[in-house]
Image: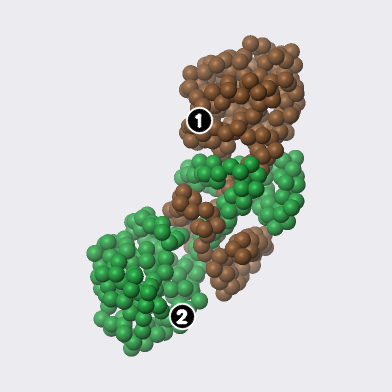
Chain colours: A green, B brown
Amino acid sequence: MNIILIGAGNLATNLGKALFNANHKILQVYSRTAESANSLAKILKSEPVTDFSKLRNDADIYILAVKDSVLEEVAEQVVKGREGRMFVHTAGSMPMSVIHADRAGVFYPMQTFSKYKEVDFTVIPCFVEVSYKPDLIMLKMLASTISDTIYELNSENRKYLHLSAVFCCNFVNHCYAMGAQLLKEHGNLPFSVMLPLIEETASKLHYLSPKEAQTGPAVRWDENVINKQMDLLSENPNMKQIYQLLSQSIHDDQL
Amino acid sequence: MNIILIGAGNLATNLGKALFNANHKILQVYSRTAESANSLAKILKSEPVTDFSKLRNDADIYILAVKDSVLEEVAEQVVKGREGRMFVHTAGSMPMSVIHADRAGVFYPMQTFSKYKEVDFTVIPCFVEVSYKPDLIMLKMLASTISDTIYELNSENRKYLHLSAVFCCNFVNHCYAMGAQLLKEHGNLPFSVMLPLIEETASKLHYLSPKEAQTGPAVRWDENVINKQMDLLSENPNMKQIYQLLSQSIHDDQL
């Protein structure tokens, strides 16, 4: 397919590469800054653009992979003068309706993208939605060229999916960060000692639900250990509050 | 080595199997209940015992893998009449001093053990401590027959290691549980859709520190998304409070 990619951030870069490797033609790459546009366009053998008026009108699909906060405004600029075309955004938490076009859509690849860390797109579940039903097959086909797992999901349920992802990824990662801080401050062990435990905790989910898989002092409600661990956090009121709240929540979950 | 194993729970079972497979001789397995003692002793080609007075006096090492809450009391029973022997416990959060013996020690394999899910002991980091220095070599040698990663760590620092493990495993798993609940209540997607994201979040830690790896609305401090997601949680005050506290903590961490 002939694609125009709007954005040059982490997601746009990873998605652009996956589409390019699946032999799609990336006609143009738009970014606000010439540097970002040039650098991604070079990788994708594409034309860099920094001015919406220079966007071509003949792409099969315009993929908007920009920050949530500017999405609606960018969409307006991209749609203007290209009304009959198909426009999709990639944001988990934004409704399809932020794109004011007859053929709007969403293509949300649910993953955490960081610079300098390439991801394997084939295992990333992608969630699609369209406003004009006949576009669904085309969008699913496009998705299937880069991912093995595609679901149709409406904007309302996608909001909760994205919220679930915040718990399973961002909040999980912050628990890792707090664990890393404790290790660094006491005993000076490398954080790598935690990796087998972290991997086993994730790997168990292939066999058990998270609730079934729970272990540790909170689920046993071992108040002796819980109180001692709270004491260890007395110099860090924020972490202590998180410890208390999560331990109580683990306990309540089992009732 | 000739080993007596005290306990028949998840940890005792996994540890016993690893020791047995490394060709150690498990002389006896103690459990309060005959059923547990028999069942584990059978697997380990060992003798089941339910009475402390029946424990042999000639083991090279007595490994106490029992609940933290009964550890000190059980240790007293095991040590009595066998004073010259070596006794180690396996508890991350308990000091070595709960064993009142000249040759006390700790052998803490840091992992989350669940029934019906076998673990590969070789990748589990083990943390050892001894009260009688000459025992250190023996304990490290024993550990190295089942694990590739062994650290000497004192009781004080082990407390923080265990606390760090609570964050990196139990609290992480509870975030998964909350994510699973959201998915179940909205859109009815299987929790398996989260597994690639969960695995990538863990896998990134091989390349980036958790702080560097952070993504999502909280680290970007996207108040629009944060407020909308808080609204989605209005019927679940507990999860809403956790959302708020963790988002704020992620944000503060970057300052």
Horizontally, is A175 left or right of A141 in the view? right
Which residue lies under the disc numbered 2? A72
Q: Position of residue B46 (x, y in %)?
A: 55, 16
Q: Kindly identify the amino acid type of the residue bearing the numbered disc 2.
A: Glu
Residue pictured at 56% horizontal, 39% vertical: B112
Instruction: Report the quarter where the N terminus of chain A lies.
Output: bottom left
B8 above or below A202?
above
Which residue lies under the disc numbered 1? B147
Foreground disc of the pair 2, 1: 1
Q: Chain of mark 1?
A: B
Residue pictured at 49% horizontal, 50% vertical: B205
Q: Are marks 2 and 1 on the same chain?
A: no
A171 above or below B217?
above
Camera-side residue: B255 or A172?
B255
Give the quadrant of residue B160: top right
Q: Which residue is farthest bottom?
A: A81
Q: Kindly identify the amino acid type of the residue bearing the numbered disc 1.
A: Ser
Helix or strand or loop: what does disc 2 sit on?
helix
Residue B43 in view = no
Residue pictured at 50% horizontal, 57% vertical: B213
Q: Position of residue A154 (x, y in %)?
A: 44, 69
Camera-side residue: A80 or B231?
A80
A111 above or below A72?
above
Give the quadrant of residue B37: top right
Helix or strand or loop: what does disc 1 sit on?
loop
